[in-house]
Image (spheres, helix red, strand yellow):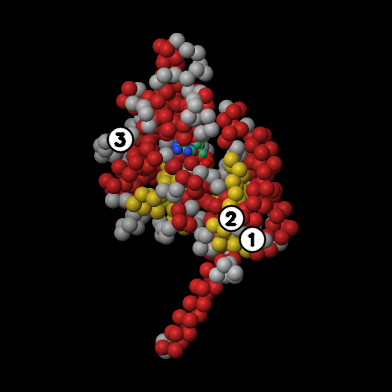
């Protein structure tokens, strides 16, 4: 290339960079913007992102406190709360980013999987919004969004292994592209967050002075810090089954039996706070962490045996609400360090449900021109929607035995 041409290009790039950062022009001047809307469960979230993953504005309305008081999520109550808050939340995200709807390049919204009544509100609002402003619509798979959020924060090339653990989901998958996933394992019953929420409820942790506003998982993590996990014996689920699937119902039953026994010993009724609540929390958290770590270990070994990850820098991404648990992260670190795998966890605020992850998934799809629909197209929500190709039978057939690894984590 001629030196003058190089100089011209350099000057042009310099101008672009200056203009990009200039407050008077704003970033919006050169980057396509996506509005993301999330209502799959009990959080109403919205965010506006540019193509680089810069968050221009975001807003989140959490229903956790309401559901804690009623002892669980009641779908029509969640629906009503989404209905009451969605307009304000979307408006706030746009306003905080100083973005007018006409500046948006697309609107992305969660359409699957999730609670039907909750999904319906987000979809209804988004469809009206895209028609009104004549914008393309990008339907989003909630779990894909959790899996890809990490790429908004740092460059993580495909393929990578991802562990998604939340209140509604529990799965291990290889992410090979924006819409290309191989599922290695999933929960055979409930998700870990659901089990933790139910244990917390059975322990009446909402009555605990430190836990009244925390989700079940958060309460268990907090109380476990002052507990002795070894004083309560729990068995790690599925020890004899050499696949990557999960199960948490049996563990929940084990904990319930122990709670009943302790109530008898302490002479208190169900609903009272037990004196050994910290120990129960610590043992439950440790068993969940060990179960997740073992299944993930087998998934890593399966990926290695089948060349499913890059050999130069194999990566495990952990996301979803339960991934914000520091003890669980440490348990996974024991495995990843042993296997020479990098462990990446988005910060807690990006692990739980939010509008940012939906907007980012919209950005990823917009960049690759995948799944972008015109404003007037009919889209239905899907409460149940698998993620990618099911490989669980192949994993089970491989029957990989795990080496013995001690998971010891100081509190
Ligand atoms: O991803 P998320 O916000 O919503 C979905 O379920 O999709 O995850 C919420 C779940 C709840 O079950 C909550 O108890 C759990 O994540 N959770 C935690 C922690 N923070 C939230 N579980 C364990 N430790 C935590 N620190
Ligand atoms: Zn989620």
Q: Residue furthest front?
A: 24
Residue 152, percent across and down? 48, 57
Residue 407, percent across and down? 29, 36
Residue 339, percent across and down? 28, 48
Mark 1 vs 2, N-terminal side: 2
Give the camera-side residue of 76 and 181. Answer: 76
- Asked if marks 1 and 2 touch (Cβ < 8 Å), the reply is yes
The residue at which mark 2 appears reads as 57
| Label 3 crowd bin: few (<14), some (14–19), many (20+), radius 10 Å | few
Give the camera-side residue of 266 and 343. Answer: 266
Q: Residue at x 34, y 54 (%)?
A: 314
Looking at the image, is 237 positioned above or below residue 6? above
The residue at which mark 1 appears reads as 99
Residue 246, percent across and down? 42, 36
| Label 2 crowd bin: few (<14), some (14–19), many (20+), radius 10 Å | many
Going by the image, does 390 lie left or right of 378? left
Mark 1 and mark 3: span between their CA atoms? 47 Å
Going by the image, does 2 lie left or right of 70? left
Going by the image, does 162 lie left or right of 363? left
Helix, strand or loop for disc 1 = loop
Q: Does the residue tagged 1 have its C-beta within 8 Å of any atom of ligand 2?
A: no
Q: Residue at x 69, y 38 (%)?
A: 80
| Residue 77: quarter of image | top right
Helix, strand or loop for disc 3 = loop
Name the disc covering residue 410, or none: 3
């Amino acid at each position: 290339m001629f030196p003058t041409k190089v100089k011209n290009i350099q000057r042009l790039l310099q101008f672009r960079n200056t203009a990009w950062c200039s407050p008077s022009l704003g970033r919006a001047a050169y980057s396509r913007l996506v509005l993301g809307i999330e209502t799959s469960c009990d959080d109403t979230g919205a965010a506006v992102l540019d193509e680089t993953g810069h968050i221009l504005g975001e807003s989140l309305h959490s229903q956790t406190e309401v559901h804690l008081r009623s002892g669980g999520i009641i779908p029509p109550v969640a629906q009503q709360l989404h209905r009451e808050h969605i307009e304000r939340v979307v408006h706030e995200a746009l306003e905080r980013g100083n973005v007018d709807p006409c500046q948006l390049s697309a609107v992305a919204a969660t359409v699957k999987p999730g609670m039907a009544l909750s999904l319906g509100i987000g979809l209804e609002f988004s469809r009206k919004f895209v028609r009104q402003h004549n914008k393309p619509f990008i339907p989003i798979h909630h779990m894909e969004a959790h899996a890809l959020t990490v790429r908004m924060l740092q460059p993580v090339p495909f393929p990578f292994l991802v562990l998604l653990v939340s209140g509604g989901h529990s799965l291990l998958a290889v992410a090979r592209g924006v819409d290309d996933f191989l599922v290695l394992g999933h929960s055979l019953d409930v998700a870990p967050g659901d089990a933790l929420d139910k244990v917390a409820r059975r322990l009446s942790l909402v009555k605990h002075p430190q836990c009244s506003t925390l989700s079940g998982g958060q309460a268990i993590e907090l109380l476990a810090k002052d507990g002795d996990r070894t004083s309560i014996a729990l068995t790690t689920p599925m020890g004899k089954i050499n696949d990557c699937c999960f199960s948490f119902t049996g563990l929940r039953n084990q904990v319930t039996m122990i709670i009943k026994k302790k109530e008898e010993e302490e002479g208190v009724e169900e609903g009272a706070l037990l004196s050994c609540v910290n120990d129960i929390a610590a043992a439950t958290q440790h068993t969940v962490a060990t179960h997740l770590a073992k299944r993930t270990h087998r998934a890593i070994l399966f990926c290695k045996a089948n060349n499913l990850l890059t050999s130069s820098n194999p990566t495990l991404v952990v996301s979803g609400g339960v991934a914000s648990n520091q003890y669980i992260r440490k348990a996974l670190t024991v495995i990843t360090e042993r296997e020479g795998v990098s462990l990446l966890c988005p910060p807690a605020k990006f692990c739980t449900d939010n509008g940012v992850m939906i907007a980012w998934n919209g950005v990823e799809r917009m960049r690759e021109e995948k799944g972008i629909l015109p404003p007037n197209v009919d889209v239905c929500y899907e409460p149940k929607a698998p993620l990618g190709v099911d490989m669980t039978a192949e994993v089970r057939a491989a029957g990989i035995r795990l080496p013995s690894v001690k998971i010891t984590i100081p509190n």
